[in-house]
């Protein structure tokens, strides 16, 4: 299929967690900046065109629980996708099947990186939510009836937005679902020197009923590098399911 090259790039604790109480310690901030430099910095290793996250990650990072300011009396919008006019050089792709995120602008700011938002909806998303996105000049694509159609999503990202290299940025359920579906080519892990031991916080990869399964996946080690502030950067090629 005609799709972008996809890599998953995440910062984790030593015990494999992507969130938790360890995020409050100063060392986490130092390593988070290194994580940013690898994918987004001036001399970044990756040359990405966009990065993709799930609804919960988008809400935690950007919309902060805001309710969409929709108009129940909005006029019917045209069928299909909406590609907004933008001069953006990067895209933030947000999986939001039902249309729940309360965006107020059409771009996100992550440190020094600005990106145009692309909402990924299913056919369950309402007309009023699509009308809101159009009013805000936020692009959206429809990929699936009730659940995400991975192939359709990736083909549209490449064909409509010319995204050649795409980063998976969490959470764990989204990361694992793409790997299980066979649509992740590479894993980049920055393992930072701290842990909190919690059994309740989210891991790098997680299954979710109806979305993915705990079928093992093999990886091939490509690179190991000691970084500043005590972190280790690992890169793996995704070999695929082991059944």
Image (spheres, rainbow, N blue to C red):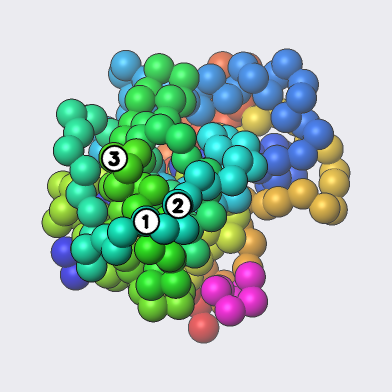
Which residue occupies the foreground of this view, 164 or 193?
A: 164
Residue furthest toward the bottom? Answer: 243
The local secondary structure at tag 1 comes to loop
Q: Mark 3 points at which residue?
A: 137
The stretch of residues the image draws in magenta is 208-214
Residue drawn where x is 32% and y is 16% of the image:
42
**Residue indicated by mark 2:** 71
**Figure check: 185 above or below 27:** below
Of residues 208 and 62, which is closer to you in this image?
62
Q: Give the percent coordinates (x, y) of residue 16.
A: 68, 46
Report the label total: 3
Q: Is mark 3 on a helix, strand or loop?
A: loop
Residue 74: mark: 1
- Left or right side of 153 for 213: right
- Residue 122 belongs to magenta span: no
Q: Which of the 4 image quadrants contains residue 21?
A: top right
Residue 160's disc number: none
In percent of width and height, residue 136 lies at 34, 39
Residue 161 coordinates in the image, percent (x, y): 18, 48
Q: Which residue is drawn at 84% across and 53% down?
A: 199
Nearest the camera: 134 or 97? 134
Q: Is residue 58 left or right of residue 230?
A: left
Split into 4 quadrants, where in the image is the N terminus? Answer: bottom left
Which of discs 3 and 2 lies nearer the camera? The answer is 2
Q: Can residue 75 be seen in this view?
A: yes
């Amino acid at each position: 299929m005609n799709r972008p090259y996809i890599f998953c790039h995440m910062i984790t604790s030593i015990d494999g967690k992507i969130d938790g109480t360890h995020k409050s310690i100063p060392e986490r901030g130092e390593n988070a900046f290194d994580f940013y430099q690898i994918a987004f910095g001036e001399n970044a290793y990756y040359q990405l065109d966009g990065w993709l996250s799930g609804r919960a990650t988008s809400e935690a990072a950007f919309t902060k629980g805001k309710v969409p300011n929709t108009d129940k009396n909005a006029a019917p919008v045209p069928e299909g996708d909406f590609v907004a006019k933008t001069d953006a050089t990067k895209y933030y792709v947000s999986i939001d099947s039902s249309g729940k995120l309360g965006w107020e602008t059409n771009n996100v700011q992550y440190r020094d990186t600005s990106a145009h938002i692309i909402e990924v909806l299913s056919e369950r998303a309402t007309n009023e939510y699509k009308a809101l996105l159009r009013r805000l000049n936020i692009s959206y694509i429809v990929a699936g009836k009730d659940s995400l159609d991975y192939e359709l999503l990736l083909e549209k990202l490449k064909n409509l937005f010319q995204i050649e290299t795409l980063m998976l940025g969490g959470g764990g359920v989204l990361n694992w679902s793409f790997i299980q579906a066979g649509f992740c080519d590479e894993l980049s892990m920055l393992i930072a020197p701290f842990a909190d031991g919690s059994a309740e916080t989210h891991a790098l990869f997680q299954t979710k009923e109806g979305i993915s399964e705990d079928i093992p996946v093999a990886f091939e080690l490509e690179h190991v590098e000691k970084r500043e502030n005590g972190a280790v950067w690992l890169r793996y090629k995704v070999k695929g399911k082991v059944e």
